[in-house]
């Protein structure tokens, strides 16, 4: 009777399994792509040195002084307030991973199949990527004091065509600004986004309204030298498969010369030369939205040195040793020192914020560690 290798006990006992070392396949992510981290954390991040919250200034009107006059006409000077200020409180996030030094001692070559520390670090980072993606495409409840404000908070849905995206449900202001307080002469809101409702993904029902929305949202600054937050227009459109899949079919219908590729326009859909991208997180939105975002204006703001950073090169004998007492950002007591010196070990006690933790490369069986602490009180050093 023929046998396979799995049926020969001695072969199994005396032979190592064939495993590709130091590599693994990631199936942890349920979504096909994650846009938020790459768009905001790298390309569109604004960093501020300090402040209890993030504020921004808006000019809401002109001063009304311009008029045509005759010779020797008397000037009319009328100084009026034209500025208001928006406010967005900070929101905080952390993600972490841990490893016990004896685990690393066991997870060494030649017995190492996959780098255990690396898998835990990557798994932690993936957790953060998923969290940001999930929260970015949804609006938090008005009573929520933990989660950040997502796209639907700033770009509000409304069935009526025009600048009618004002307040998400449950809110009385957006970014600390009440839209009804700033109106154009025709009664439309100045602090609002353009909205419309469509019944089908067709040229008449969607694309014609979409073109109008893009045109009416294409604002130029009236004064050429006005300092603005815009870092350069970088527009994109974001939707789900219910919209994008049909847009691709419209493209195919418009072009009879597709050649041998029966899906030539997959991944190449554009509107007014701007990319139209599918956001997997929006698949759960049954209204099939289309969000237009100018990344030159839309960005994330963060505090400088407000996060813990760990860097360095680890060897098989010098692995990460990070005291759990440090917590997320605040500690009452911490200990650091070499294993033994002529002066004993140094103990630092106090209250401070850990802003940076760095481990250097091992040299001559020694490794250097340094940290930056923003103290909020007296810090004492003792020897023991």
Image: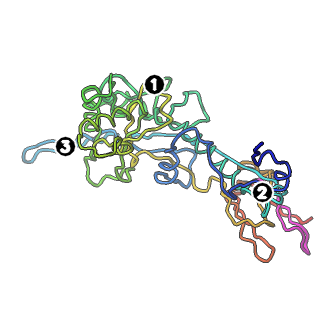
Asked whether 197 falls inside the magenta stretch, the response is no
From the image, tell me which residue sits under label 2: 322
Give how far across and how far down residue 326 sits, in percent: 77, 52
Q: Quadrant of the C terminus?
A: bottom right
Give how far across and how far down residue 272 sits, in percent: 27, 43
Q: Earlier in the sequence, mark 3 or mark 1?
A: 3
Q: Secondary structure at mark 3?
A: loop
Q: Number of marks in the image?
A: 3
Q: Nearer the viewer, mark 3 or mark 1?
A: 1
**Quarter holding residue 360:** bottom right
From the image, tell me which residue sits under label 3: 66
* Region in magenta: 333-351
Q: Earlier in the sequence, mark 2 or mark 3?
A: 3
From the image, tell me which residue sits under label 1: 286
The numbered disc on residue 340 is: none
Q: Earlier in the sequence, mark 2 or mark 1?
A: 1
Q: Say if 316 sits above or below 10 in the image.
A: below
Residue at screen point 52% across, 54% down: 47
Q: Residues within 10 Å of mark 1 (few under 14, many from 20)?
A: few
Q: Nearer the viewer, mark 2 or mark 3?
A: 2
User: Does the CB distance between marks 2 and 3 fall below 8 Å?
Assistant: no
Q: Quadrant of the N terminus?
A: top right
Q: Secondary structure at mark 2?
A: loop
Q: Nearer the viewer, mark 2 or mark 1?
A: 1
Residue at screen point 37% across, 44% down: 236
Asked whether 338 falls inside the magenta stretch, the response is yes
Residue at screen point 70% across, 58% down: 21
Q: Secondary structure at mark 1?
A: loop
Give the CA distance from mark 2 to mark 1.
46 Å
């Amino acid at each position: 009777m023929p046998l396979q290798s799995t049926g020969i006990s001695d072969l199994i006992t005396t032979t190592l399994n064939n495993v590709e070392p130091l590599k693994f396949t990631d199936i942890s992510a349920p979504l096909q792509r994650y846009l938020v981290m790459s768009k905001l954390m790298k390309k569109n991040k604004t960093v501020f040195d300090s402040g209890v919250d993030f504020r921004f200034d808006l000019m809401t009107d002109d001063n009304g002084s311009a008029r045509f006059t005759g010779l020797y006409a008397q000037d009319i000077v009328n100084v009026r307030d034209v500025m208001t200020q928006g406010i967005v409180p900070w929101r905080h996030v952390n993600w972490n991973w841990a490893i016990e030094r004896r685990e690393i001692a066991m997870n060494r070559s030649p017995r190492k199949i996959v780098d255990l520390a690396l898998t835990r670090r990557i798994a932690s980072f993936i957790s953060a990527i998923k969290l940001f993606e999930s929260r970015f495409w949804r609006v938090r409840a008005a009573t929520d004091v933990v989660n950040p404000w997502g796209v639907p908070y700033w770009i509000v849905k409304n069935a009526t065509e025009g600048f009618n995206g004002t307040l998400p449900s449950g809110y009385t202001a957006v970014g600390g600004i009440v839209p009804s307080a700033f109106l154009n002469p025709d009664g439309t809101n100045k602090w609002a986004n353009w909205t419309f409702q469509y019944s089908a993904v067709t040229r008449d029902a969607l694309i014609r309204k979409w073109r109008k929305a893009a045109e009416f949202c294409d604002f130029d600054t009236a004064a050429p030298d006005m300092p603005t937050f815009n870092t350069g227009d970088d527009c994109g459109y974001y939707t789900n498969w219910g919209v994008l899949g049909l847009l691709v079919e419209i493209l195919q219908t418009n072009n009879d010369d597709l050649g041998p590729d029966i899906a030539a326009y997959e991944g190449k859909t554009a509107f007014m030369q701007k990319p139209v991208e599918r956001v997997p997180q929006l698949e759960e939105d049954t209204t099939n939205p289309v969000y237009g975002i100018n990344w030159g204006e839309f960005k994330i703001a963060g505090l400088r040195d407000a996060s813990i950073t760990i860097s360095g090169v680890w060897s098989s004998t010098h692995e990460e040793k990070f005291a759990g007492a440090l917590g997320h950002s605040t500690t009452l007591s911490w200990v650091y020192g070499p294993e033994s010196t002529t002066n004993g070990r140094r103990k630092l006690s106090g209250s401070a914020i850990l802003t940076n933790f760095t481990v250097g490369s091992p040299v001559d069986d020694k490794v250097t560690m340094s940290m930056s602490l923003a103290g909020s009180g007296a810090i004492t050093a003792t020897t023991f």
